[in-house]
Image (spheres, grey):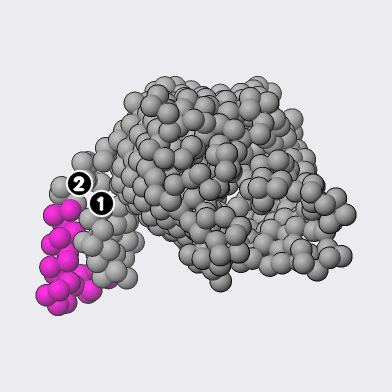
Amino acid sequence: MVDQHCGSAAVNFGVERVLGDEQTNNKLPGDRVAGLHDMRQSLIACLCLVAALLFTVKSRGDDPMVVLIANPSVIQTSLSLETVRAIFAMRQRTLADGQAVHVFVLPDGAPLHEAFAKKILGVYPHQLRLAWDRAVFSGTGQAPNEVATASAMLEAVASTPGGIGYAYRSELTNQVRVLDIE
Amino acid sequence: MEMPDTFQVHGFMSQALILTDHNDFFGPSSRDTGSLEYTELGLNASFRPRSNVLVAGQVLSRKAGGYGDAWQPTLDYGVIDYQLLSEEERVLGLQVGRFKNPFGIYNQTRDVPSTRAGILLPQSIYFDRSRSLGLASDGITVYDEERFSKGTLYVQGGLGIPQVNGDAEISLSPTKPSLDGQLSTILQLLYAHDGGRINLGVSAARVRSAFQSRQNPSARGDFIFQPVILSAQYNAERWSLTAEYEYQHKELRNFDNDIYNAVTDGESWYVQYQFRLTPDWQWLLRYDQTVSDRNDREGKRYASDGRGPSYSRFARDLTTGIRWSPSSRWMVQAEWHHVDGTAWLPRQDNESDEETVRRWNMLLFQTSYSF
């Protein structure tokens, strides 16, 4: 599996698999080391590293922790990753208990938005933008509510029943709840 | 309880300049000054009167050269969407009204510039000259989302009357037989893996219409258009690779005079590479090919039967383009097509098949705005 990831990063020259590797690495720290046992793989790993250095603007370690937040009216304490992806792709309009979801996002280029999309959802901001445009212009969904700043996001989620958004863990207030992602 | 307003209004507009060395595409593009006759305007509104209901509608006004409905505002879609189930692992819903046909990767938002890969979609599959055949249906569609640990399966089935218009008539034959849309079916299965990093899909439709010759009104039967599309896409941070293949079954049947009953199977495919140089700049490279009749790939038999030029039965289009998005609302694009064949060249813009040129080039510029 790790071999596959590294291989595609080397061939495709993209940073995305490197990010993917980081996620994989977090979950399965042993696998990666175990996988690198011959020279070809070491070489590919080197190429991955070079690609990472070239294209990764921020490494995961530099990123402040980003968390999924919700209005206290949301009774769920955790959601599955696919459900959270569906909510932020504007495909899931209600939660399991029937409560309407109101999604809040920051502008595409905002570092917090990018971090949430890539590290938490595992998708790129351009994919989210396309998903929203497709929903909005095909009659299958609505656009999320865009707010300008991280503090406006906290306020909006805190004051909107069914509100869902994201925040830096360091900036959390007790007006919002953190949801775990399974 | 304070609730945010769920009423939303969105829209888009686009204007293109099209220049060709031979043949006309969307207006008199082969003139020195080119054609400005490609404009799109769309406006939609939606709201959620209840947590599990969405009401949405969009009006589209469009000018595309000699295409039939110039500027005439049409209801692009108008649906009441009701989600019967909305659970962690499953969403099940239905749409009643005029719904966009889920067909291939792009069909549902084919007129929205920000959702297209380039100014024109691959014409072999998303042909504009007879677009009404696949655009939208009046009826009911049921959709289901099944979520797994690593991906989501989307299933959608629809039953409705298609908007078969004059564009389909002239594209089917220069004699413009009358076509009247009949109850049709559509089905799509789409699997999105890992948040859409890998997308795989199958779409199939059976579009039925009643056929009546205008030259010989007693010649009546059915025209069946039955396409199947296989779709595959890989999305990375900086690039996307997309490929689709379509098998097109076209059939004229139930004519009393057996001379009309005929089957033609065509096929189309394209491979497309999008590279995001920066978040604002994107480069497109695409090869797109269509064959009107798999048993007559070069159109030789068609030509020897005296029905038209051989090259009107295929098209091979090499496309490259660049897109600049100075903001999430604005987009400026330029695109060049080198085409061998005229299979998807609009008859609406070219007087006669015989006066077209086999090898031609097309340069397009487009500015678009959406909100």
Image location of residue B306, percent across then percent down: 60, 59
Mark 1 nearby-residue class (10 Å; few <14, some 14–19, many ≥20):
many
At label 1, the amino acid type is Val
Q: Is residue B152 above or below residue B135?
A: below
| Label placed on residue A55 | 2
Image location of residue B345, percent across then percent down: 52, 45
In the drawing, does residue A13 fall left or right of residue B103? left
At label 2, the amino acid type is Phe
Which sits in the foreground, A89 or B56? B56
**Chain under disc 2:** A
> Would you identify the image quadrant in which residue B108 lies?
top right
Disc 2 is placed on an element classified as helix
In the drawing, does residue B66 fall left or right of residue B325? right
Look at the image and tell me in which quarter the N terminus of chain A lies: bottom left
Please tell me which residue is depicted at 43% across the width and 33% down the height of the picture.
B30
Q: Which residues are magenta?
A: A29-51
Please tell me which residue is depicted at 43% across the width and 51% down the height of the picture.
B358
**Do we see residue B130 in this rendering?**
yes
